[in-house]
Amino acid sequence: MRVVVLALALLAPARAAVIASGAPEAIAFQRFSVLTSPGPDEPRPEVLAKSRRLMYAEHRVQKGEGWVGALAKSYGSTLSAFQATNNNEFVLMYPGMRMTVLNRDGQLYEVRKDSETLDAIVAKFKVGVEERRKFKEIVVRVNNFPGVALLEPFEFERGDRVLIPGIRVSFDTYHFPFASQAPPRISSRFGSRYHPILKRRRMHEGLDIPKPYGTPVYPARSGRVLDAGWNEGYGQLVIIKHNNGETTRYGHLSKIMVKPGDLVQSGKTMIGRVGSTGISTGPHLHFEVRDKNGKAVNPTQKIGRR
């Protein structure tokens, strides 16, 4: 068993300050925070699941762990909690993938800057004075914060964690562009490769996914069709622009079923069918993801994420 230094932190931030009104200096309140000694890289889920205290750790996906919902349950948590905490829908899971795990339901919020207050955090999730007041009481209770946190500004340091209960994240994330979301076979991955037709090394800016001729192709993410038609080596190509400014490309299609300007929905609007048009050695889909500046990024790193 490999051993590394891994912190299993009890979820009350290590340090925080309550600033007393009119007081010249911050009053420090010591709260519970314990770090374990170095332990196994993979903490046993039952340790967290049986704990009466809020805890979190890092988990590395093992072979055979195919659904994040089952993994969340083993830690005493929920699918939505894992998704919200990691900002990942977990459409795609693979051995070695790392994630933050916790033993409660809710989003484990990570403080990004020193002196962020509890009021500022609550304001990110609720609107309205009365609604924020009530929600703040709940956050204080579930995190076991001292009662004074309700009376005075309560500050955190960068890296502290706060459990935000009852949070459900609505994901607009990337999926594989087919009806089935089972990870497909990929014949050529993102990166430099020797091109089988051009006979030279060049950057492969997407994924080649072999599928039978005519297989329906769907948007990997909802958006608006930017272009649809013949495009040199891509053959029949559809380009879709998404709300965040990124685009996806679907090449070598045998048939295009949308036109520029069409709104298309992830997994529901058929945009075309798999083919072998353009520079291609056989029926497959060439799938790309490009950032706001038009730079190609690895699609496998976007699956399940915004």
Image: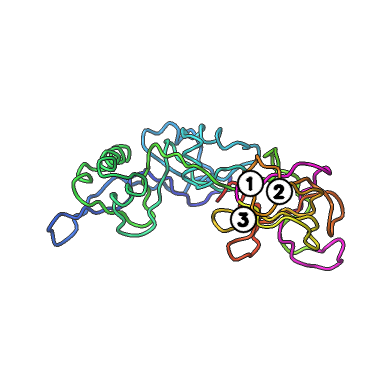
The mark that comes first in sequence, 2 or 1, is 2
Residue type (three-letter) at the residue carrying disc 2:
Val
Task: Give the spatial CA distance, label 1 vs label 3.
Answer: 10 Å
Estimate how packed mark 3 is, as few (under 14), some (14 to 19) or many (20 or more) residues with alpha carbons within 10 Å. many
Stretch in magenta: 194-223
- The quarter of the picture where the N terminus appears is top right
Q: Pinpoint residue 288: horizontal percent, then vertical percent.
A: 69, 56
Give the residue drawn at x 83%, y 58%: 278
Rendered residue at 48%/52% (across/down): 5
Q: Earlier in the sequence, mark 1 or mark 3?
A: 3
Secondary-structure class at tag 1: strand
Query: Amino acid type of disc 1?
Result: Val
Q: Which mark is residue 264?
A: 1
Identify the residue at the far left of this view: 22
**Residue beneath disc 2:** 258
Pointers 2 and 1 in contact (CB under 8 A)? yes
Q: Find out whether the residues at labels 3 and 2 contact each other: C-beta distance under 8 Å.
A: no
Image coordinates of residue 57 in percent, x first then y, are 46, 45
Residue 235, percent across and down?
Answer: 81, 57
User: Residue 47 versus residue 3: which sits nearer the camera?
Assistant: 47
- Marked residue nearer the N-terminal end (3 or 2): 3
Q: Is residue 302 magenta?
A: no
Q: Is residue 210 magenta?
A: yes
The residue wearing badge 3 is 241
Q: Main secondary structure of the magenta part?
A: loop
Q: Identify the element where label 2 is drawn.
A: loop
In the rendered image, residue 108, in percent from the top left (x then y), is placed at 41, 44
Residue 216 higher or lower than 4, as above or below:
above
Q: Nearer the viewer, residue 121 or 100?
A: 121
Q: Relative to 60, is 143 on the left or the right? A: left
Classify mark 1: residues with Cα within 10 Å, few (<14), some (14-19) or many (20+).
many
